[in-house]
Image (cartoon, helix red, strand yellow):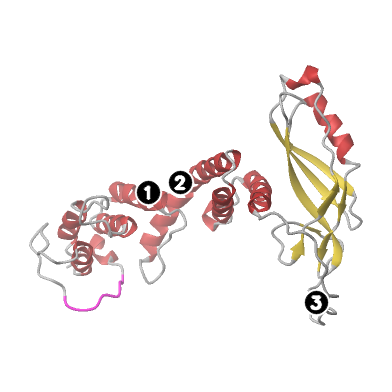
Amino acid sequence: MATPARRIIVPLLLAGSVARIAFGQVPAGRDPLGAARDLYASARYDEALAVLNDLRPSEAGNSMTDRRSIEQYRSLCLLALGRGSEAETAIAAVVSADPAYLPSETEASPRVRAAFSDVRKRLLPDIVSTRYAAAKMAFDRKDYPLAEQAFRQVIALLDDPDMGGRLGDLRMLSNGFLELSVAASAPPPEPPRKEPAPAPPTPAAPQIDLNRTYTVDDAGVTPPVVIRQDVPRIPTQYSKQAHERGVLEVVIDEHGRVTGLVLRVSVHPMYDSLLMTAAREWRYQPATLAGKPVKFRKLIQINISRGD
């Protein structure tokens, strides 16, 4: 009679018969990962684990080996053998390498999926914080394409159900820096040229909610264009104590006026009030949706020069 640990075999779709493999050894020319899969499918967990333990993705001859697959099958074997703590270590390696990965129902049993989910819930906050810091470093060194990609990954992980809504404050900052990265990566505008009159709008225009404040995440919205955005110089007596960068959130109404201000990252307490006063006078061509002006929330990075 099979032990309880042996009854958690994951229903994997494997074709062909199971190879007859000696313990811990794979015949020449045989794919080691494929051999480990076959051993696992035939409930020979100790032998499958021995094959997996000999695999190293970075070694010559294993350059095409998928690290995620190795650690995934290692965790499955360990769970089947009742070695839960070691299985969690293997799952953690998978999650660290690919935080978005979670086995599907066809890949793993409910118990294995629950084990993956538990590990992800524990590790994701630290992974998100680390990836946000890396994205911010890419932004600070002006590698805007890399920063854009990294901030998109951070936002996707923040929306993962296993995050449970944690680190919500990073989402607004990530969205703002994503907007700045996209703008900085865009090619310079072409010289203005005469264009034919635009065609009349199609009947199937999107629904516009005039009470809503749109952001860069909303499809079809054209962001506002700066008409006047004068950033005041920092007084000399404050410059040495000031931070080099600040982040100001503004709400721009349908007329291009600033109607809301929130300072997300301070420069200097005394300079902040000067900045907020100046920002109320900024003017923009309003954001549009289907050609109609709409309210828009925008993050603006404030750069302070020590020489100002």
Crowd band around label 3 with a 10 angstrom C-alpha radius: few (<14), some (14–19), many (20+): few
In the rendered image, the residue lying farthest to the bottom is 203
Q: Name the amino acid type tagged 2.
A: Leu
Quadrant in the picture for residue 188 = bottom right
Label 3 secondary element: loop
Give the image location of residue 154, x and y in percent. Answer: 56, 50
- Count residues near mark 1 (Cα–Cα under 10 Å), then give few for <14, some for 14-19, many for 20+: many
Residue located 15% across and 67% down the image: 30
Quadrant where the C terminus lies?
top right
The region drawn magenta spans 11-17
Number of the label disc, if any, that sits on residue 123: 2
Element marked by disc 2: helix
Residue occupying image coordinates x 81% and y 81%: 202
Measured as percent of width and height from the top left, residue 61 is found at 20, 56
Residue drawn at 13 percent across, 71 percent down: 19
Q: Earlier in the sequence, mark 2 or mark 3?
A: 2
Of badges 3 and 1, the one in the foreground is 3
Q: Which mark is residue 217?
A: none
Residue at x 78%, y 52% (from the top left corner): 297
Residue beneath disc 1 = 92
Instruction: State the predominant SS element of the stretch in magenta.
Output: loop
Q: Which residue is mark 3?
A: 205
Q: Earlier in the sequence, mark 3 or mark 1?
A: 1
Q: Mark 3 to mark 1: distance in Å?
A: 47 Å
